[in-house]
Image: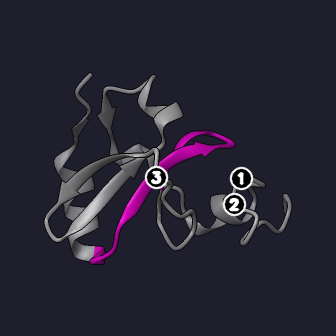
Amino acid sequence: MEITVDPEVEQLIKDAGCDYRVCTACLGPALVPTSVKGPKDTDVQIPIGNNVLYISRYVARYISKVTIDMVYDDDEIDACPAFPNRYHGYQ
C-alpha cells in the first residue's frame, strides 16, 4: 500500500527542518515532531527533503494519505496521554 503526503505536510517538515511521525493519539492519527514521539524500528519511512516522515505501522494500515489536519498543536499534545513526556491532563 502506498501512502501519499500532502504538499502542505511536506512543506511543514522542510520548514521545521526536523523529522516528524504519524502515530496513534487521542483524536486519531497525530502528526508530531519526533521530539514529541520518537520513531520506532517498525515505522514506515518516507523521505521528505533532508528529513524523514515516520508512520506507525498501526496507523499505516488505515491511512492512504498524510494530511495537514493530522498536525497536533501544543494544547492537543499537552492534553493527550499518548504523549507522556508532555501530558498535563485536560484543562
Q: Label 3: which residue?
A: 41
**Mark 2 or 3, which is nearer the eye?**
3
9 or 40, nearer to the observer: 40
- Residue at the (53%, 64%) spot, across then down: 38
**Distance of label 1 from label 3 (alpha carbons):** 18 Å
**Side of 69 where 73 appears, left or right:** right
Mark 3 closeness class: few <14, some 14–19, many ≥20 residues within 10 Å: few
Amino acid type of the residue that numbered disc 2 sits on in the rendered structure: Phe
Q: Quadrant of residue 50?
A: bottom left
Please state the extent of the stretch shown in magenta in the rendering. Answer: 16-31
Q: Give me the residue at 22% from left, 43% from top.
A: 6
Q: Which mark is residue 83?
A: 2
Residue 64 is tagged as: none
**Element type at mark 1:** loop
Numbered disc 2: secondary structure:
loop
Picture layout, residue 91 above or below residue 27: below
Q: Is residue 54 left or right of residue 8?
A: right
What amino acid does circle 3 point to? Asp
